[in-house]
Each structure stands twice: as C-alpha cells, then as structure tokens.
Amino acid sequence: MRSSAKRTAVLGALLALSVALAVAESMMGALLPLPIPGVKLGLANIISMFLLCCFSLPLALVLGVLRTLLASLFIGGIGMFIYAAPGALLSILAMYAAMRGIKALSLTGVSIIGACVHNLAQVCVAVLITAETGLFIYAFVLMIVGAVSGTITGAVARLTFPRAAMALNMPYSNDNSQEVQNA
C-alpha cells in the first residue's frame, strides 16, 4: 500500500468495521441469551488478526484500544472498557507472539490463542475488581468457549484474508511463514 491517504482510509474502514462487529455482536447477545454469561464470538478479533498479518503490531494495538473505547461508548460505558481493553491488548500481544514464535501455527491456532487470552484477561480483571478468586473457576469454562469461538473466527480469517489483501493490493501469504510486516 503506497499512498498514505489510502492507508489511512483503509485503517479507518477497518476500525469502523471492527466497531460495527463489536456492537452487532453485543446486540445479538441481547437477542439470543446464552446460558454462559458474557460469551461472545469475538468477531472484531478478525480485524486485529488482519492488522497483525498485513500491517503491524503497533497499529493492531492502537486500533484495538480505539475499538474497545468506541464500542464501550456505544453499548457499555466505562465498565465495559475496563474489562474489554486489557483483554483486547493482551490477546493482540499473544497472537503477535504466536505468529512470530510458532511458524507452524495456522490462523485458526492464532485465533484460539487470542480468544483464550482475551477471556482469561477479563476473568483476571473481574478478580482484581471484586477480589473474588472463585471467579477463576469460570476461566475453565471460558477456555472451552475461547477454543470454539477462536476456531470459528480463525476459519473466517483463513477464508477472507487472502481476498481482502488482494482487494487492497497488499502482500499476503496463506501460511504463517512470513514475518509480520512493519508499518
């Protein structure tokens, strides 16, 4: 991507898409109550993985914080931000480390790691806020949920990233052997 104006427009569109996915996902949770409180598919995580694959870690982190801030303003307030921001940041860092450190790991594997780390970070925040260590039991349930949701979002990423990169005229490889690009 050569033009800085084009790059800025693409990043703005990716931020808008990630916020829209986060808001839509929260609305779906209100319409379809699940037996496990707080469970979401993590669709906005797809955008974070795309940023890690095609842009850079700093951009993924910045857009992750902006996404959680904007989504919190739209649907949950500061309480949601306090839980979502650490989850987003730590999951992006974990996915980056997995992409860089485990070359044989597929996007689905990276997505599972991101989902599980996000869930664990949110449980840790809840324990810090409430001082109720019994909440760590809930982490085991959320690890299973993270594995399932990470598999789904990883499959979506595997199918869509090559087409998205081609549409944006960006280099992309289906395997995880390429280094994460710098912005």
Image: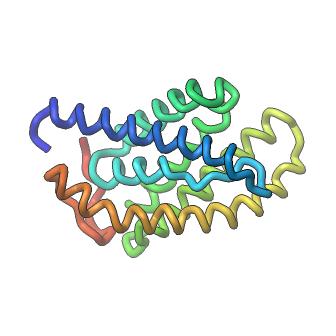
**Quarter holding residue 157:** bottom left
Residues 121 and 164: in front is: 164
Q: Give the x, y percent position of residue 119.
A: 66, 52
In this view, 101 is above or below 133: below
Q: Give the x, y percent position of residue 52.
A: 36, 51
Residues 38 and 97: in front is: 38
In the displayed orientation, state which residue is furthest to the front.
31
Q: Residue at x 24, y 41 (%)?
A: 183
**Quarter holding residue 35:** bottom right
Residues 171 and 159: in front is: 159
Q: Is residue 130 left or right of residue 153?
A: right
In the displayed orientation, state which residue is furthest to the bottom.
104
Q: Residue at x 27, y 52 (%)?
A: 54
Q: Is residue 132 left or right of residue 15?
A: right
Q: Residue at x 63, y 52 (%)?
A: 40
Q: Is residue 29 left or right of residue 97?
A: right
Q: Residue at x 73, y 44 (%)?
A: 124
Q: Is residue 27 left or right of residue 53?
A: right
Q: Give the x, y percent position of residue 86.
A: 60, 39
